[in-house]
Image: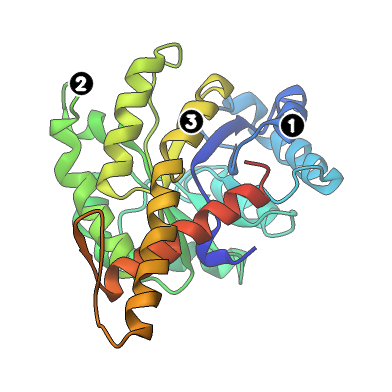
Amino acid sequence: MDPRFRPYRSVLYIPASKPRALDKARGLPVDAIIFDLEDAVSPEEKTASRGILAEALAQGGYGIRARIVRINGLDTEWGRADAEAVAKMEADAVLLPKVDGPADLDELAEITGDLPIWAMMETPLGMLNAAAIAAHPKLQGIVMGTNDLAKELNARFRADRLPMLTSLGLCLLAAKAHDRVIVDGVYNAYKDEAGLAEECAQGRDMGFDGKTLIHPAQVDGANTAFAPSEAEIDLARRQIAAFDQAKASGQGVAVVDGRIVENLHVETAQKTLAKAEAIAALGG
C-alpha cells in the first residue's frame, strides 16, 4: 500500500494491559490501533502491560492495520522504560503524549531511534508550537487530545466545538504544511451515533484524515464519514476522464456538472480514487 494514501479513518484506542481486548482488536475493521500504555492502564498495571503488549504484537494477526503504541510521558516514572520497550516491539510508530515542542520529540527519538513518532497535541503550549512540532523529521502523525486540551483551556463542551476550533485549526495547518497525518480527538458519548456522525462530519469537512475512537461501536461511523462517498468517487472518475478528453483536444480545462475542472481538481480527484483503492485493500 502506498503510504501516502494509507487510510486513517478509524484509529481505536486499546488498553495494552487487556489481553482479551488486544485479541479482539485483530478482527475489528479499523485502519489503525493505538495500543495504550498511558491513560487506559492503571499505575499498578503499567510495568506488566509492556510485556503483555510486546507478546501480542509478536504474535501478529493485526494485518496491515497501523500499529501505534502510546507511551507514558518521559517526565513520568514509566515513560523512559515504555520507550525502550516500544523500540523493540513489532510496532509501526510510537505516540508521545502532551507534546509541548520539538525538544520533546528529540528526547524520545534518542531512545526509539528510527521508529516513526506521532505526537499527542493536547496542551496550550503544544498548540502554539504546532508548526515546529509538525516540522520534526521523525514525526509521522498528529493526534488531537481534545479531552486534555479542554481541561487545560477550561473550555465548556459544545456540540459545535467552538472553543476547540482555534486549536484544531492550528494543528491542521501545521500538519498540512508538513504533509503529516492528522486525526481528530475522541467523541466521548460512544452510544450517541448521531453526535458522533455530526462530529465526524465536522472533522472531515475541516480536513482531518480520521478520528480517534474509544469504543468499537464507533468504528463504522468513522469509517463511513472519512471515506470517499460513491458520489465523490463517481465525480472524481468523470473529472479525470473529462480533463483527459479536453487535453486531447488541446483544451486546458474541462467542464463537469457545470463546473470548471482544472489541474488542481484532477489532482484532488486522483487522490480520492487512490484513497478509495487503499480502503478497498483494507477490506473496505
Q: In the image as oriented, which residue stretches furthest toward the right?
A: 59
The residue at which mark 3 appears reads as 213
Q: In this view, does 223 lie to the left or right of 150?
A: right
- Residue 85 placed where, x, y %? 70, 52
Q: Provide the secondary structure element on which disc 2 rests.
A: loop
The residue at which mark 1 appears reads as 27
Q: Disc 2 to disc 1, how far (Cα)?
A: 33 Å
Q: Which amino acid does label 1 sit on?
A: Gly
- Residue 210 placed where, x, y %? 43, 43
Q: What residue type is labelled 2?
A: Phe
Number of the front mark, 1 or 3: 1
Query: Could you say which quadrant of the image residue 136 lies in?
Result: bottom left
Q: Is residue 144 left or right of residue 44?
A: left
Number of the front mark, 2 or 1: 1
Q: Provide the secondary structure element on which disc 1 rests.
A: helix
Label 3 Cα neighbours within 10 Å, binned few <14 / some 14-19 / many ≥20: many
- Camera-side residue: 62 or 57? 62
Q: Disc 3 to disc 2, how far (Cα)?
A: 18 Å
Q: In the image as oriented, which residue stretches furthest toward the bottom?
A: 250
Using the rendered image of the protein, determine whether residue 104 is visible from the camera's viewpoint: no
- Camera-side residue: 278 or 26? 278
The residue at which mark 2 appears reads as 157
Q: Residue at x 31, y 29 (%)?
A: 199
Q: In this view, does 274 lie to the left or right of 134?
A: right
- Say if 270 sits above or below 202 in the image: below
